[in-house]
Amino acid sequence: KMHSIGIICCVLLFAQLPGSQGQCASSSSTASVCPQLVPSAADPSVYVQVNPLNNSISYTLDFPQQIPCTSSARTCSYVTGNSYACSSGLTTAAGMTSTDLYYELFPGSPTACGHGNREFSFLVRKGTLPGKLLVAMMAGGACWDAAGCGMDPSLRSLAIDSLDYDSAPSVPKAFKDNLQRTVTSLKRGVLDPSPSNPFAGYTVVLIPDCTGDLHAGNASHTYAQNDPSKCVTVHHRGAVNAGAVMNWVVQNFGASATNVLLLGTGSSRSSKAAGSHGAAFWAPYLQSALPTATVRVVIDSSLALFGPGWYTAMKSDPWGTTLSRDPTGASLLPSADRWFIGDDDMSTYYEYVAKAMPSIAFGDIRCCPPRTHVLFWFLQSSAFQRTIGGCTPVIVDTHFCR
């Protein structure tokens, strides 16, 4: 079902906010330098933590940081001689010499992942069709309590797609692996570069989620502050991270963009919906910043609903969504008296923003049965005996529509 939608959204700059509160007793108040996760020369599928100040590989920063670690902008790829290499600063699209390899771009501070001990980065594959863009807001899972945001991998719902290689919330290994020519997991389906794919010539921009806030947060929040065994401070900077990427997109394609496909999706069954909401939040900014472009948005497994436990968790806005800003300084979301993430669902959000920018078309895709919807709904409720439209959601199959 297609809907005409509009909105005002996004974020670029982050500061310690009035809404940021508390700290864990054992936390340091000094910022450390972020380790750089670099592929091992012996095995590029294995990553080591490198101290950028002295290139030491004995450096680790595995515990949540009260103050996020600091980092500098750089661009890394396997373009030169098929070996991994980095250069300072963010390369421009014009400066990318390859159209079949991904580049990894690190915006640097103030971007960061959720525990404040890993850098944020995004991937770009330059296209052959000028003005055509595919921007994917990838899911990673969401969190709003000490268990979901903490360090226990069996309980964590924050950045779950990075748990296969890193104990800390970080950019998924699958992203980094795809810089290599021989890895193809991000060269399938809509990302397939072969001529049979109608989007093959599009420039691809992939935005990971490592902050647990639907790409919409701008606050640091301490959970279980009075329990030393569970206390954790999470830096919900999803809107800061996404804003840095959107700023790069607009700087490089603002004058030439003609067609933009904005996707909200993910590689994990239990986290897909998080990316979907992020795409909805950012679509209006892209349309306003790229006024000559036709913007179309595909939402994966959203249902436009939040689970029954959502409103209690979001009532205090632990992610700081009301403080989020886009690269122009405008608010990411409507004012709280019109729409608030702790009171309203996505369907009313769509109703509100449709009047602002009717040129944007949204499509929702889902699977049969809607297992991802059920998992996301379950994540937001301790009582599963709640209903969607009078029907109790039940997981009845393990197969997904493709």
Image (cartoon, grey):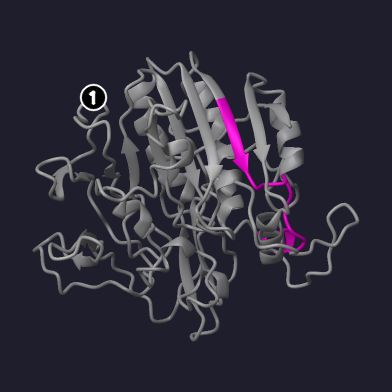
Q: What's the magenta region?
A: 296-315
- Give the side of residue 89 with respect to residue 278, left or right: left
Examine the structure image and report whether residue 52 is included in the region drawn in magenta. Answer: no
Q: Is residue 113 above or below residue 156?
A: above
Residue sitting at 40 percent across and 29 percent down? 200
Number of other residues with Cα within 10 Å of mark 1, as a class: few under 14, some 14 to 19, many 20 or more:
few
Residue 253, given in percent of the width and then of the height, sits at 36, 22
Q: In this view, does 250 lie above or below 243?
A: above
Please, what secondary structure does the residue beneath circle 1 have?
loop
Q: Residue furthest right?
A: 390
Residue 397, given in percent of the width and then of the height, sits at 71, 62
Residue 332, given in percent of the width and then of the height, sits at 56, 38
Determine if residue 322 is in view: yes
Q: In this view, does 388 lie above or below 345?
A: below
Q: Which amino acid does label 1 sit on?
A: Ala
Residue 135, given in percent of the width and then of the height, sits at 45, 35
Residue sitting at 37 percent across and 25 percent down? 201
Determine if residue 337 is in view: no
Q: Where is mark 1, residue-wise?
A: 94
- Give the side of residue 266 with respect to residue 99, left or right: right
